[in-house]
Amino acid sequence: MENTPPPGPTTGTALHIGGATLHPGFLDAESQAAMVGDIARIMHLAPPFSPITSWGKPMSVAMTSAGKYGWFSDRRGYRYVTAHPAGGAWPPIPTSVLAVWRRLVGRTRDPDCCLVNHYRPGARMGLHQDRDEADFSWPVLSISLGDEARFAIGGTRRSDPVERFWLRSGDVLLLGGAARLAYHGVDRIAPESSALIPQGGRINLTLRVVD
């Protein structure tokens, strides 16, 4: 599809794309800046690292987590763990992030994990399913901050057709229902398309109910 981001959709208009629900511009500039500050504190307490895939290669995305669990990968496979690889419990999920979940998903249950992905220019995330959780009835909620990213989403089989669209800073995406186990990924970052993050790049937060 396109290599440069087209004009974005109207802020506040929920869109249904590939079975997912996109809330473009859900966070205003002030809320985005405050959230980036909260995430910086998480990164200070639990420094990002590049997990090793099960086939022995480091991911191009730097990761850390907040909440009861953090997502982790090594040659043993993908899983959730209760401590940072360097030791110590994960920091709590910031109130600013929980507020987004509570508005769009509800207050019945808060997420157990906020995975923090930091994409630098050239980083990507191959097509994958989020299936390390125990209960797929809860959606995965994704918050985009910083540089724009071209997002890819298909069906529940890797061979299904893939649709691509751009995620912009402040967008929130929900993968639930039929899209909960859809293959998805990020195949391109638009460098310097945002000045929100002091060190540059894109921060993606994904909130999940784990157990």
Image (cartoon, rainbow, N blue to C red):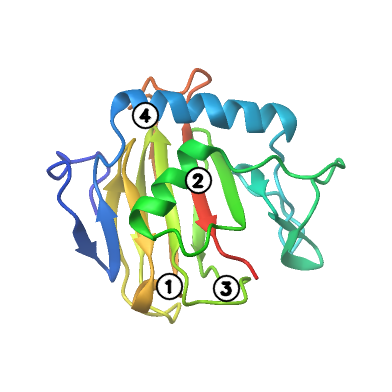
* Residue 61 visible (yes or no): yes
Given this view, does label 3 or label 4 mark the residue nearer the observer? 4
Q: Residue 139: x and y, percent?
A: 44, 67
- What's the residue at 70%, 26% (across, down)? 44
For the residue pair 175 and 3, the one nearer the viewer reads as 175
Residue to which mark 4 is pinned: 31
Of the residues shown, which amino acid type is indicated by label 3?
Arg
Mark nearer the N terminus (1 vs 2): 1
Secondary structure of residue under mark 3: loop
Q: Which residue appears farthest toward the front when viewing the image?
A: 108
For the residue pair 118 and 138, the one nearer the viewer reads as 138
Q: Is residue 53 above or below residue 144?
A: below
Mark nearer the N terminus (4 vs 1): 4
Of the residues shown, which amino acid type is indicated by label 1?
Arg
The reply, left or right, for residue 54 in relation to residue 206 is right
Q: Which mark is residue 131?
A: 3
Q: CA distance from mark 3 to mark 4?
A: 30 Å
Mark nearer the N terminus (3 vs 1): 3
Of the residues shown, which amino acid type is indicated by label 4?
Ser
- What's the residue at 51%, 59% (across, down)? 126
Find residue 6 and report its image quarter.
top left
The reply, left or right, for residue 157 in relation to residue 29 is right
Q: Which mark is residue 180?
A: 1
Q: Residue 78: x and y, percent?
A: 71, 65
Of the residues shown, which amino acid type is indicated by label 2?
Leu
- What's the residue at 48%, 23% (across, down)? 200
Residue to which mark 2 is pinned: 205
